[in-house]
Amino acid sequence: MTAVIESYIMIDANSVAWVADTRVKVIEIALDKLAHGSSPEELHFQYPHLSMAQIHHALAYYYDHREELDDEILRRLREVNELAARQADSPLRQKLRGLRLENER
């Protein structure tokens, strides 16, 4: 008997893990799991085009590469926070605040 293991995860040229034959990154599934505590069944509801096997493989890949993916998540979070801080008092925001204050009068 020959064992066949279907590859559900693909690594691209930039070392990004994807659910094979989809446009879904493993990190996206991991983020949904972490942010919302979603079960595999709940993730399947959010990603109905993925099979349960694909979801379980994505989660398994995350747990096998947790440190690397958690570092990427933290890097992205820092980047978002830096962008938000730079935009907090932009000229556009000041103008919008002024318009809002005028409309509230």
Image (spheres, rainbow, N blue to C red):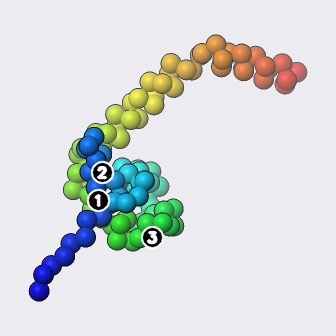
The quadrant of the rendering that contains the C terminus is top right
| Label 2 crowd (10 A; few <14 / some 14-19 / many >=20) | some
Give the label on residue 17, or none.
2
Residue at 64% x, 13% y: name it: 91
Residue with the mark numbered 1: 9
* Amino acid type, residue under disc 3 in the picture: Glu
Q: Measure how far apart labels 1 and 2 are at the Cα level.
A: 6 Å
Judge by depth and name the residue closer to the eye, 31 or 49.
Answer: 49
Give the label on residue 41, or none.
3
Q: Relative to residue 55, is residue 81 depicted above or below?
A: above
| Label 1 crowd (10 A; few <14 / some 14-19 / many >=20) | some
> Dots 2 and 3: beta carbons under 8 Å?
no
Q: Relative to residue 25, is residue 79 depicted above or below?
A: above
Quadrant hosting residue 88: top right
Marks 2, 3: nearer the viewer: 2
Judge by depth and name the residue closer to the eye, 9 or 45.
Answer: 9
> Dots 1 and 2: beta carbons under 8 Å?
yes
Q: Earlier in the sequence, mark 3 or mark 1?
A: 1
Residue at 42% x, 53% y: name it: 23
Horizontal placement of 8 versus 99: left or right? left
Q: Earlier in the sequence, mark 2 or mark 3?
A: 2
Q: Secondary structure at mark 3?
A: helix
| Residue found farthest to the right | 105
Q: Secondary structure at mark 1?
A: strand
Q: Earlier in the sequence, mark 1 or mark 2?
A: 1
Judge by depth and name the residue closer to the eye, 95 or 49.
Answer: 49
Marks 3, 1: nearer the viewer: 1
Q: Measure how far apart labels 2 and 3 are at the Cα level.
A: 21 Å
Horizontal placement of 104 versus 58: left or right? right
